[in-house]
Structure formats: structure tokens, C-alpha cells
């Protein structure tokens, strides 16, 4: 189900990917003077892994692990976590892991025609029709983001900024340009910064 053969290198990559997202989470949650408000991890976003198995090229769910670490280690400052998942595929692992956790809210906006495994129920799932372009996609996202952040009022936000909605992605089924992805990211950053 993971999609690639096991090797020492793949084990190291999977562990370091999760560790990098946890380190970025500590950097944001450690509220010392000068601590960053935002942190990123390019090797993260392994949102298809479940608590008991890997799936879809994801061995461990780095977002889920980091969210749990934040809730455990920063109890005074982090009680509400928001996961904004804008990969072309649904964030099925995050949805399943946090299905019964009231402290973590999962939002997944993904292509309606692009499920490779059983769909899980996020707190909010938004399906975008195959072939959607920048204007359609950004209008849908904009119509949800403000209310989402107001409803959840997160103290920590994880943003799965998948690049597979890009028009050049052979499997993505959406037609979002590079400029459209940049605008998408700015919309999310703007809302996160306001809250």
C-alpha cells in the first residue's frame, strides 16, 4: 500500500520527514523571543498514512505526529489545531486519525475525481471538479477559508500545500497554474496570520 520498496534509505527518509515536521512545530510553538510564527518543511505532508499503516507513498503521517506532539508538549498554548489540506488528493490519513479528536479540525479541499483509496470523512471535505482552473479553484477556496478560521480559531495551523493540483501534474486532474498555486498559498498564509 505504501507504493515503493523498502530500503535503509526509505526508512531514513520517512523518519527524517516526520522529525522535520516535528522540529518545525517546536520552532513555532516554542514562544521564546524571536521564535518564528511560521515554519515550513518541504519533505513533509505525508497525509495518506494512517495510525496503523502507510499508504499512498506515505509511511508515517508527519502532520498527525506533529499535531499530537504540539497538543502534548504545549498544552497551555495549543488546544485547537487546524489542518488545511490542499493536496489534489483527500487528506485521508489525517481525517481518519483525528476523526474522534475534538482538538484537531481537518479541512481537505481536493479533486472529486481523484481518490486512490476509500474516502475518509474530514471535518470539512470540499470536492473540486476535475479540470478546474485558477479562477474556479481560488473562488472555492476563498469562500471557505475565512469562515473556517473563524469557526476553528486555531492556535496552530498545519498547511499541506500539495503541488499536485498543478496543471502539469500527470495524475492531478486539476488545471491550476504556478501563479494560481502561489495565490492559493498567500490566501492560506493571510488567514493564518490573522488568527
Image: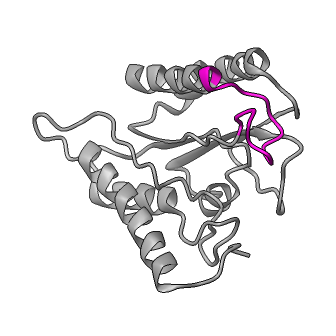
Left or right of 103: which side holds 27?
A: left
Q: Is residue 176 magenta?
A: yes
State the count of labels.
0
For the point 53% across and 33% down, the residue is: 152
Residue 71 seen in this snapshot: no
Q: Specify whether 120 is left or right of 14.
A: right
Q: Residue furthest left?
A: 33
Task: Give the image's coloring scheme.
Answer: one colour
Could you tell me residue 186's position as x and y percent?
A: 50, 21
- Residue 19: name its quadrant: bottom left
Q: Which residues are magenta?
A: 165-180
Q: Residue 61: give x, y in percent of width and height.
A: 54, 64
Q: Residue at x 60, y 20 (%)?
A: 179
Q: Nearer the viewer, residue 141 or 81?
A: 141
Image position of 3 with respect to 81: above or below: below
Residue 43 visible, this orientation: yes
Q: Is residue 20 above or below residue 12?
A: above
Q: Residue at x 34, y 61 (%)?
A: 72
Residue 135 percent location from the top left of the image: 75, 14
Q: Where 78 falls versus 183 (above or below)?
A: below
Which residue lies at the image location 86% right of the left edge and 41% below the top edge? 112
Q: Nearer the viewer, residue 114 or 143?
A: 114
Q: Position of residue 131 (x, y in %)?
A: 87, 30
Amino acid at each position: 500500500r505504501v507504493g515503493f520498496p523498502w530500503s535503509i534509505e526509505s526508512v531514513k527518509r520517512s523518519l527524517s520527514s516526520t522529525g522535520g515536521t516535528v522540529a518545525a512545530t517546536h520552532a513555532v510553538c516554542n514562544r521564546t523571543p524571536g521564535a518564528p510564527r511560521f515554519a515550513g518543511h518541504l519533505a513533509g505532508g505525508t497525509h495518506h498514512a494512517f495510525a496503523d499503516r502507510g499508504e499512498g507513498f506515505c509511511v508515517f503521517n508527519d502532520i498527525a505526529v506533529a499535531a499530537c506532539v504540539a497538543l502534548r508538549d504545549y498544552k497551555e498554548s495549543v488546544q485547537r489545531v487546524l489542518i488545511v489540506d490542499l493536496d489534489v488528493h483527500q487528506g485521508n490519513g489525517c481525517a481518519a486519525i483525528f476523526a474522534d479528536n475534538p482538538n484537531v479540525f481537518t479541512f481537505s479541499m481536493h479533486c472529486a475525481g481523484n481518490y486512490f483509496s476509500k474516502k475518509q470523512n474530514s471535518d470539512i471535505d470540499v470536492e473540486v471538479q476535475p479540470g478546474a482552473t485558477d479562477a474556479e479553484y481560488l473562488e472555492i477556496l476563498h469562500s471557505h477559508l475565512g469562515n473556517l478560521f473563524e469557526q476553528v480559531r486555531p492556535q496552530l495551523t498545519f498547511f499541506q500545500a500539495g503541488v499536485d493540483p498543478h496543471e502539469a501534474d500527470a495524475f492531478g486532474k486539476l488545471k491550476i497554474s504556478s501563479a494560481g498555486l502561489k495565490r492559493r498559498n498567500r490566501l492560506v498564509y493571510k488567514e493564518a496570520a490573522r488568527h
